[in-house]
Image (cartoon, grey):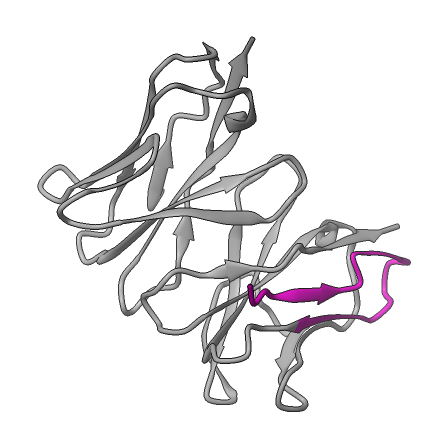
Amino acid sequence: RKEVEQDPGPFNVPEGATVAFNCTYSNSASQSFFWYRQDCRKEPKLLMSVYSSGNEDGRFTAQLNRASQYISLLIRDSKLSDSATYLCAAHSGNTPLVFGKGTRLSVIA
Amino acid sequence: EPEVTQTPSHQVTQMGQEVILRCVPISNHLYFYWYRQILGQKVEFLVSFYNNEISEKSEIFDDQFSVERPDGSNFTLKIRSTKLEDSAMYFCASSIDRVRELFFGEGSRLTVL
């Protein structure tokens, strides 16, 4: 059973575009959700935590839909530097942080 | 900004050799983790450590693996007899709380020949 699923992409978008990624999770007891960014052969870096009320950080917006068990990440006004793999992660108090396989984004000039 | 540090950044070893990967978690964090990522695959949980003992481990973390916090700052992962399939990037992470975000080190790339 895949606990956290993501569309692997790649998503190829032009600079300035808006792009959205979804991620589904299977453990209904999951209570903490995060988006990480991973550059090639680098460590995952926390992009943002995902709260029940949703949250926004500059060009990035994360949403949580508990009823449908998915979280989303919206990137507005894409920059070349946004090119990376975006990892969705979830955990409950009883399970470790579980990552999806990641969605690859390429922003093209 | 506090960060997790890992050494070595890259280690090449022969199959059957023992390897120790070292990590210094963020100083006020209480939970420590090892994850690994085989090239092209997902980041996989290996083990979590809290209060000087293993709190959870995955099926990957078999008897060949062990973790230790030998002093107040270091957190180590030992692979007793490496196999070819142990070749991966090993990430150490720490968190202040069990359900809070994890912060990762830059990773140790292990190549087993």
The residue at the point 53 percent across, 42 percent down is B42
Residue B22, given in percent of the width and then of the height, sits at: 72, 72
Residue B82, given in percent of the width and then of the height, sits at: 79, 62
Position of residue A4 measured from the top left corner of the image (x, y, whole percent): 34, 43
Who is closer to the viewer here, A63 or B85? A63
Q: What count of labels does the image hold?
A: 0
Task: Give the quadrant of residue B25.
Answer: bottom right
- At horizontal 64% and vertical 35% (from top left) the residue drawn is A40
For residue A6, what is the image quadrant? top left
Tell me the residue at 54%/47% (across/down): A44
Say if the magenta span includes residue B68: no
> Taking B29 as reference, is B105 left or right?
right
In the image: residue A34, left or right of residue B103: left
| Foreground pick, B23 / A67 | B23
Which quarter of the rendered picture does the C terminus of chain A lie within? Answer: top right
- B45 w.r.t. A99: above or below: below
Find the residue positioned furthest to the left. Answer: A67
Task: Give the magenta part as a residue range.
Answer: B1-23
Q: Is residue B16 magenta?
A: yes
Q: Nearer the viewer, residue B64 or A56?
A: A56
Q: Say which residue appears at 46% left-offset and 88% top-offset.
A: B51
In the rendered structure, the answer to whether residue A74 lies left or right of residue B61 reads left
